Amino acid sequence: MKRVLVGPLLKVLFRPWVRGIENVPAEGGAILASNHLAVVDSFFLPLVLNREIVFIGKNEYFTGAGIKGRLTAGFMRGVGTIPVDRSGGRASEAALRTGLRRLGEGKLFGIYPEGTRSPDGRLYRGKTGVARLALESGAPVVPVAMIDTDRAQPIGQRLPKPTRIGIVIGEPLDFTRYAGMENDRFILRAVTDEIMYALMSLSGQEYVDVYAATQKARIATGHAEAASSQDAGAATAPGGRPAPEVHVPVPPEDDAGASVG
């Protein structure tokens, strides 16, 4: 229903282009792990897929007061967002179980490994929940890079402005070799870093080896620049590997075939 109501308008205003759509499995459960630049990321990825996908989203989207709060909650439910309490504990575990149940039903589940939106357009350290999900479910992980959605909707801007956005989908990653090792924190970190490395390669983003939530706190206290310089020398890519030579993807030259129809 959401695609019927808002899909045509979004296509006209943002002219989304997509590359690698064939990498999304035609059937069976799969985890789509995406970088996270803007709230609208959760709108555009479902728009270009032929299969239904749901994401988890912060609980605050569902608890807002007034007309705006109700509209936001209704829209989030409409696009299939599952609320999660980001304070951790049992609520986050429940969200993980929801994802496992959906994957077990042979459906698509979307997740943002960074845990929150990037505060400055760079790619941040992934949380290991995505690795747990992959190892416990046995489902493949399909890396997805959102391009320029932060230009369409910078942090603090409620409504996105018409700006062409892109989506680059990488080849599925298979982690079944680690089956039964979901309680090994070193394996979870290695798997998460491999996923983040794929996202870095697809998106062309600079990588910062701290959590996005930590960097947001640094920005709030005025320590972001100093922390960035320190982190830049610590690691250049996930897992401490040398950074690959990457470039931010650009739209195909053939506009006639670039947008999603």
Image (cartoon, grey):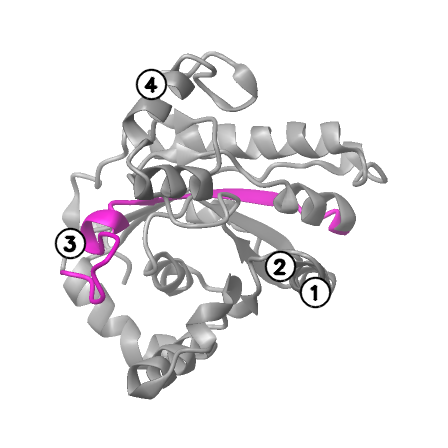
Q: Amino acid at mark 3?
A: Thr
Who's the residue at 13% across and 60% down the image? 162
Q: Is residue 238 magenta?
A: no
Q: Dot 4 lies on which element?
A: helix
Residue 208 image point, x, y percent: 41, 27
* Classed neighbour count for the residue bearing mark 3: other residues with Cα under 10 Å, few (<14), some (14–19), many (≥20): some
Label 1: which residue?
A: 94
Label 4: which residue?
A: 229
Going from the N terminus, do you reach mark 3 or mark 1 first?
1
Going from the N terminus, do you reach mark 2 or mark 3 first?
2
Q: Dot 3 lies on which element?
A: loop
Q: CA distance from mark 2 to mark 3?
A: 32 Å
In the image, taking residue 82 as reference, residue 49 lies left or right, namely left
Q: Are marks 2 and 4 in contact (CB under 8 Å)?
A: no
Who's the residue at 57% across and 65% down the image? 84
Label 3: which residue?
A: 163
Q: Which residues are magenta?
A: 137-161
The quadrant in which residue 220 appears is top left
Q: Is residue 142 magenta?
A: yes
